[in-house]
Amino acid sequence: MVDSKRSCSAKLSGRVSKGLVDLPQEIISDILSRLPIELILTCRIVCRSWNHLTQDPDFVNLQLSRSNYQPTLIIEPLPASGINFTVDHLLLLDAEHKIKRIPIESMLLEEYEIMCSCSGLLCLSPITKLDPMVIYNPMTRQRMILPSLDCEAIRSHEDGFLRSHEAGLGYDLSTGRYKVVREYKYGNESSRFEILSLGESSWRELSAPHSLNDCYWDGSPSLFWNGALYWKIIKDSNGDCNISILAFDLSEEKFQILSFSNKFSFPWSSCDLLDLDGRLTLVEHKYDTNMMKLWRLSGKKVGDFSLCLEQIYDTHVKWTSEMSPMVISGLNNNGYLLCVTLWKDGAQRTYITRYFPQNAEYWHLDIPVITELFNTYSFRPSLVSPVAASLLP
């Protein structure tokens, strides 16, 4: 690995000696920002000026904006039942559907799980505890440990059993700061919500909608889109379980529940909440049918959203509780990346599959290095530093 980096560095140094370094800085910045993250990190050891350039906030933002057009995934291997398992790596599925192994320090993921992702940063949390949470860039290996809840506050709960824990990481467009929002519940008490801007020394309590008491989390990670965080939740209304969205405006720091009970209901359909082509989208899968529907949430602010049916696909596959799909991301060629879960003889197996609705074609991705069980997260490889983000005024 070291020899290959030196070889790459030598080649780049040769180009520098031929006059590349004499180009205007704007052109050099434009060229370097189009490279894969691994090559940009190698460029940092070519010369001092490139090292300074690629760590400049303007360059970091330029590279991040271009990663919007490179759909990638982080794959988190999961332990099989009854097997001792230590996560020492993550897998990056790039835009060309090639797998790259990302080594992870054992102290980060041995007892941790990925909660969510935003701008190339992962929010990690202990599996059975509330703290400490970690903001981590797996490409640059930079991390920041967030402040913990003080011991006296923990003792004030009814008991020490953590019943639920959810988190969201997003970027406040009005202040230019990254914020973490978390929900947790101990014992039989109601959910508590807290917020923290990276760089702050303590969490601040948030007021959540009272109607949230009738809701529960469906286990999907949060989604950051256009200045707000979104969680898919299940709302229990007079015995009927309906799919809803909990939205949180990071600038105004206010919650709102978006209910679509008149559109579709759980459990006869399942929905995936994701960013498709820069638009907030709900993808509905009708159980015991071949149908897949795309619902777009139109509007600019949380309170102004309306749900509109945009597309209906005949998937030519009858989805059931034993074989269910989840849309992970869109593909550049009018397709979708699916995570298909199969249950057979009491065992679960998950596959990553490309789906092209116009031709009704499915292409299974053969990824031999992953385990039978894994989680996937939409991911944009970036140079964003959680430490630098915490130092903003």
Image (cartoon, grey):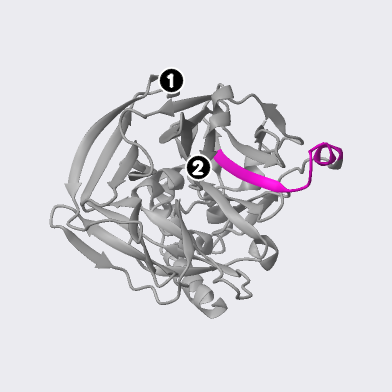
Residue 231 visible somewhere in the drawing: no
Residue 370 x/y as whole percent: 45, 72
Q: Is residue 155 magenta?
A: yes
Tell me where the magenta segment starts and ends, as one range. Answer: 152-169
User: Quadrant of the image for the C terminus?
Assistant: top right
Name the residue at the right extreme.
Answer: 152
On screen, residue 342 versus residue 134, left or right, reads: left
Residue 146's x, y, as percent? 71, 45
* Residue 14 colored in magenta in the image: no
The residue lying at 78 percent from left, 47 percent from top is: 160
Instruction: Name the residue nearer the viewer: 367 or 178.
Output: 367
| Picture layout, residue 52 above or below residue 110 | above
Left or right, 20 with reference to 199? left
What amino acid is found at the position of numbered circle 2 in the picture?
Ser
In the image, residue 217 sits, relative to residue 176, either above or below, namely: below
Q: Residues within 10 Å of mark 2 (few under 14, many from 20)?
A: many
**In the rendered image, which quarter is residue 356 located in?**
bottom left
Say few, some or many: other residues with alpha carbon within 10 Å of mark 1 (under 14 / 14 to 19 / 20 or more): few
| Residue at figure coordinates x 45%, y 51% from the top left | 380
Q: Which mark is residue 303?
A: 1
Q: Residue at x 57, y 77 (%)?
A: 2
At mark 1, the secondary structure is helix
Q: Which residue is mark 2?
A: 222
Hey, what amino acid is under mark 1? Gly
Instruction: Name the quadrant of the N terminus.
Output: bottom right
User: 322 or 276: nearer the eye?
Assistant: 322
Q: Secondary structure at mark 2?
A: loop
Sooner in the amino-acid sequence: mark 2 or mark 1: 2
Report how far apart the C-alphas of labels 2 and 1 lie in the structure: 18 Å
